[in-house]
Amino acid sequence: IHEKDFIHRDFHSGNILVEIIEYELCNIDQYLIGDLGLSQPANNTLSSNEIYGVIPYIAPEIFKGVAFSKSSDIYSMGMIMWELTTGCKPFVNVGHDINLIYEI
């Protein structure tokens, strides 16, 4: 996505798709990024300041009014990696509401 100069803006673990390709000797897992409905060109200056996405995966600067960027997608990927490493969704101990936004 970033190589094509697009940002996702709603990147979380639910948007990662796994395709298993079966061969005679082995299977290969292919990972794909889905749900591109909120994606936009990285250089889009007409974007509103609306906040999209799943709160635990949204970069902190977005809550301060900074526009989505490739960096905010990378933050989301970091939260996905945290989830894969720990086996728990990020901020599972905090309600997903305004309190979580302050926590982030």
Image (cartoon, helix red, strand yellow):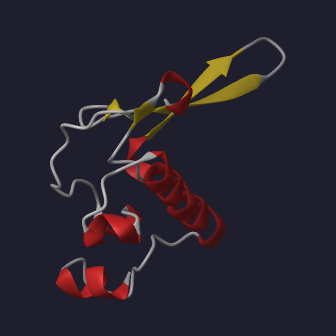
Residue 9 position in % (x across, y down): 33, 46
Q: Residue furthest top?
A: 24
In this rendering, the answer to whether 23 lies above or below 33 is above
* Residue 25 left/right relative to 57: right
Q: Nearer the viewer, residue 72 or 85?
A: 72
Quarter of the view holding residue 55:
bottom left
Of all residues shown, which one is farthest toward the right? 25
Between 23 and 78, the residue placed more toward the observer is 78
Q: Residue at x 44, y 55 (%)?
A: 72
Relative height, residue 99 to residue 18 (above, below): below
Q: In the displayed structure, would residue 25 be above or below residue 14?
A: above
Looking at the rendering, which quadrant does residue 3 occupy? top right
Camera-side residue of 5 and 89: 5
Q: Please identify the quadrant where the C terminus is shown.
A: bottom left
Q: Choose top left, top right, bottom left or bottom right for residue 66.
A: bottom left
| Relative image position of residue 87 (x, y in whole percent) | 57, 69
| Residue 97 in the image, given as x and y percentages of width and height | 19, 79
Residue at the spot 74% in from the left edge and 13% down from the top edge: 23
Query: How many marks overall?
Result: 0
Residue 71 vertical placement versus 20 (above, below): below
Q: Is residue 55 left or right of residue 31?
A: left
